Image (tube, rainbow, N blue to C red):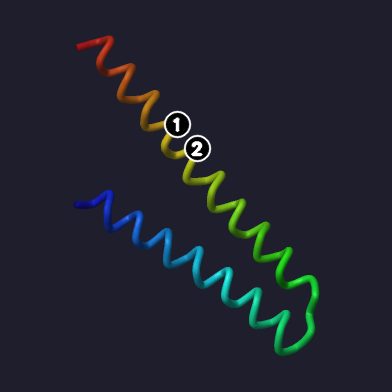
Amino acid sequence: MVADSAETLLCAYLSVILLVGLMLNATVGWWWADPLAAIGIAFLALREGREAWEETTKQSGQAEQG
């Protein structure tokens, strides 16, 4: 259940970043807002991947000890 709520929160962050970038590009004409949003999404994806990697490494280390 906690993993589902974390996934939902991450999806909400990704959606907000995407929509803000697209809206700034469409309404104000800031062409750089869309690529900046893409960098923000990439940052979040890398952070989530690193956290998943660290948790998997921690769990496999505990399994070897136990």
- Front-lying residue, 25 or 58: 25
Q: Which residue is mark 1?
A: 53
Disc on res. 13: none
- CA–CA distance between discs 2 and 1? 5 Å
On screen, residue 45 versus residue 30, left or right, reads: left
What amino acid is labelled 2 in the image?
Arg
Name the residue furthest bottom: 27
Image-quadrant location for residue 58: top left
**66 in relation to 5, above or below:** above
What's the residue at 50%, 68% (across, down)? 15
Relative image position of residue 42 (x, y in whole percent): 61, 52
Q: Which residue is mark 2?
A: 50
Image-quadrant location for residue 5: bottom left
Crowding at label 2, few (<14), some or many (≥20) Cα neighbours within 10 Å? few
What's the residue at 80%, 75% (across, down)? 31
- Front-lying residue, 8 or 60: 8
- Front-lying residue, 66 or 48: 48
On screen, residue 54 versus residue 26, left or right, reads: left
Relative image position of residue 52 (x, y in whole percent): 41, 37
